Amino acid sequence: MNEKTNDMLFDLLTKKAVYGLEEAEQGHLDDLDAGTAEMEFRSLELAVAAISTVGLEEEELPFHLRSKIIEDGEHHFAEARTFVSELWPPATSRLSSVSEKDDVSGGSWFGWFGWAAAAMACIALALNLWFTRPQPSVEVAQNKPPVDTPRSLSPTELRDQMLKAATGTIKAAWTIGNVKELTQVVGDVVWSDDSQKGYMRLQGLPANDVAKETYQLWIFDKTQDAATPIDGGTFDVKSDGEVVIPINAKLKTQGPQMFAITIEKPGGVVVSKRGRIAALAKVETQTKPTA
């Protein structure tokens, strides 16, 4: 087979593997070299199939496809080895039976062998491109700025808001009680009937030993008997200086007239004997909302 025929065979086989042949072209290919062309086409088709897998970038090469390529390659090249052994016998036999037909067959075999080598190189190239292809870069999540969460207001801030915005806020100043040691208790208490909330601001009330005693607030309301004031909750003072304590009234309050802080046993009491009154605050003024 001459060089021109080989080029024509190459063009036809390439077109058949990639696009397919028309009837006339297939007939021409069959006329050139039916047996050899078919085996060359199978090798070239295998190479094209292997190369086409390189474009699959989004997922890993499927195991069954990789196995299929390897299995088909071994099958086709096993046929090639058989074909070579038939066309190219051992040297001792070849030396005694060289003829023109052997030369033609040998030429056809060399042509096929070139195709087989090219197909093997294509398969190797395809697999190499697949396994060494650039992996898609993983987008690194940018650190988003922290979201500001609403900050809980302190009792001092809540007290200030009540004084500025609440309608009908009651305010009374603390004075000393009947405990001789407590002579400098100052501050005030604010309360709102509308929201049923209030705060005590105290300075000069010493820290208490929680294992021995606690402070307890009492609210003397105009709707309540003076003998049984409303329990405003217990609290502890842990350090010297000014403190702001939320009021925790156990009953609804409607018009407080006086507040009292007593010293009681840990946990507080239901009814106080009022033997140790730390501070008193008589209601005299009512704060109006600011304009």
Image (cartoon, grey):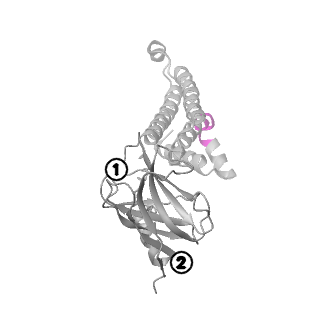
SS assignment at label 2: loop
Closer to us: 239 or 106:
239
Circle number at residue 178: none
Query: Is residue 71 left or right of 187 when viewed as pictured?
Result: right
Residue 156 point in image, percent of width and height: 40, 65
Determine the residue positioned at 50% across, 21% down. 88
Residue 241 visible within the image? yes
130 relative to 290, above or below: above
Spatial distance from mark 2 to mark 1, Cα to Cα?
32 Å
Residue type for callout 1: Ala
Where does the magenta region start and end? 31-38
Residue with the most extreme bottom position: 291
Residue 165 point in image, percent of width and height: 48, 77
Residue that label 2 marks: 168
Neighbours of disc 2 within 10 Å: few (<14), some (14-19), many (20+): some
Residue 86 point in image, percent of width and height: 55, 21
Determine the residue positioned at 63% across, 37% down. 34
Residue type for callout 2: Gly
Neighbours of disc 1 within 10 Å: few (<14), some (14-19), many (20+): some
Residue that label 1 marks: 207
Q: In the figure, residue 179 lies in which quadrant?
A: bottom left
Query: Is residue 264 left or right of 16 when viewed as pictured?
Result: left
